[in-house]
Image (spheres, rainbow, N blue to C red):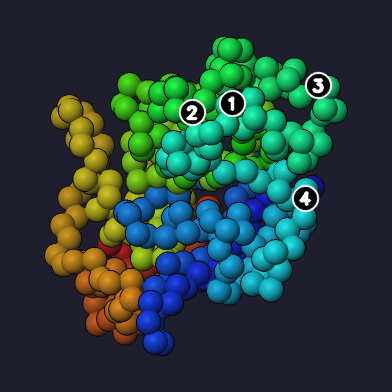
């Protein structure tokens, strides 16, 4: 059986912003996530991370490309034809739990809806199933009768995770699930997600801009910049041998508190320019306005992904055959 669970091929998501002008939020992304992976998708705000998530879920109609999941294939024309099996197997946990939960319903009503829609259990066993799911996320039984407005931010996110678990999914997209929470609560949520990944044999796409969190939760990492993937690697390789100048810049900017941690960081890569407008992305490599290693070719030609070693690919002219490496 193939280990590939989700494949994105030349995925594009453009948004019109005027006559003949588009924001190229996702611009030709190729990405494969294997069963059991925790794929970290990292990048600055506006890089296209969440747009990929919403396109996979069918919330946006893709501009071009293909999405393959568990034997199903989706293109722009098939956006509205995702099967009920896909809708059971693929779930999402949003960044802000307060806006993703209905404040006028109690937790029992919120969790019972997916159980009813997908007929997970008979109607007379719905309450038992809800109690089982609450135990999985370590919430007490009395939470069934609480409303989102009466609980804290971390508890709301646990309810959101519980809702995603209702249908026994195979794949969960986690869209910055801790970024809106207090630091004291973030560790609890991260530990809960790690535990559920192991116990439920789940596969995650974990979207974040926090490189420290990513190191602790992912087994593979993909870096996005202006709608494109610029590097993919196993997590250990990624932190030990970052290749793309943008990746090196992100890692060198991680705050540390000891000289030992500082010694593990890559050499400082200083950005020399501004992030371009996503409406007017420059010709050639989109990172050329900020890259200290750019050449004339970087100003003309958009680089292609190339595999440097098994599982480690980078989109940078510095690693073309015959070119000295950065």
Give neighbour class at mark 4: few <14, some 14-19, many 20+ (Cα, 10 Å): few
Q: Residue at 51% of width from left, 66% of height from top?
A: 29
1 or 3: tag closer to the N-terminus: 1
Task: Please name the residue that numbered disc 1 is placed on.
Answer: 107
Give neighbour class at mark 1: few <14, some 14-19, many 20+ (Cα, 10 Å): many
> In the depicted view, which residue is nearer to us: 180 or 308?
180
Q: Can I make out residue 304 in this image? A: no
Task: Please name the residue that numbered disc 2 is placed on.
Answer: 148
Give neighbour class at mark 2: few <14, some 14-19, many 20+ (Cα, 10 Å): many
4 or 3: tag closer to the N-terminus: 4
Of tags 2 and 4, the one toward the viewer is 2
Mark 1: secondary structure: helix
Task: Please name the residue that numbered disc 4 is placed on.
Answer: 84
Relative side of 185 to 168, left or right: left
> In the depicted view, which residue is nearer to us: 5 or 121?
121
3D distance between C-alphas at marks 1 and 3: 16 Å
Mark 2: secondary structure: helix
3D distance between C-alphas at marks 1 and 2: 7 Å
Relative side of 245 to 59, left or right: left
3D distance between C-alphas at marks 1 and 4: 23 Å
Task: Please name the residue that numbered disc 3 is placed on.
Answer: 125
């Amino acid at each position: 059986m193939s280990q590939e669970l989700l494949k994105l091929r030349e995925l594009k998501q453009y948004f019109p912003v005027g006559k003949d002008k588009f924001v190229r939020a996702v611009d030709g992304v190729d990405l494969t996530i294997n069963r059991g992976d925790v794929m970290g998708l990292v990048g600055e705000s506006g890089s296209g991370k969440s747009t990929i998530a919403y396109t996979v879920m069918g919330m946006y109609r893709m501009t071009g490309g293909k999405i393959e999941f568990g034997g199903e294939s989706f293109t722009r024309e098939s956006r509205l034809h995702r099967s009920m099996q896909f809708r059971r197997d693929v779930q999402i946990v949003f960044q802000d739990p307060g806006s993703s939960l209905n404040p006028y319903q109690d937790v029992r009503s919120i969790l019972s809806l997916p159980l009813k829609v997908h007929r997970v259990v008979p109607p007379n066993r719905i309450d038992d199933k809800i109690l089982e799911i609450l135990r999985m996320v370590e919430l007490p039984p009395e939470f069934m009768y609480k409303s989102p407005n009466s609980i804290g931010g971390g508890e709301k996110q646990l309810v959101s995770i519980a809702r995603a678990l209702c249908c026994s999914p195979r794949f969960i997209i986690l869209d910055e699930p801790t970024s809106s929470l207090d630091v004291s609560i973030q560790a609890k949520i991260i530990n809960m997600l790690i535990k559920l990944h192991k116990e439920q044999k789940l596969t995650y796409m974990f979207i974040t801009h926090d490189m420290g969190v990513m190191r602790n939760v992912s087994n593979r990492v993909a870096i996005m910049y202006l709608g494109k993937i610029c590097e993919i690697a196993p997590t250990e390789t990624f932190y030990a041998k970052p290749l793309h100048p943008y990746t090196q810049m992100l890692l060198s900017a991680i705050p540390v508190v000891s000289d030992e941690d500082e010694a593990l960081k890559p050499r400082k890569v200083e950005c020399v320019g501004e992030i371009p407008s996503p409406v007017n992305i420059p010709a050639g490599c989109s990172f050329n306005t900020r890259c200290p290693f750019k050449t004339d070719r970087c100003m003309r030609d958009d680089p292609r992904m190339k595999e440097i070693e098994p599982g480690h690919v980078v989109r940078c002219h510095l690693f073309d055959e015959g070119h000295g490496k950065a």
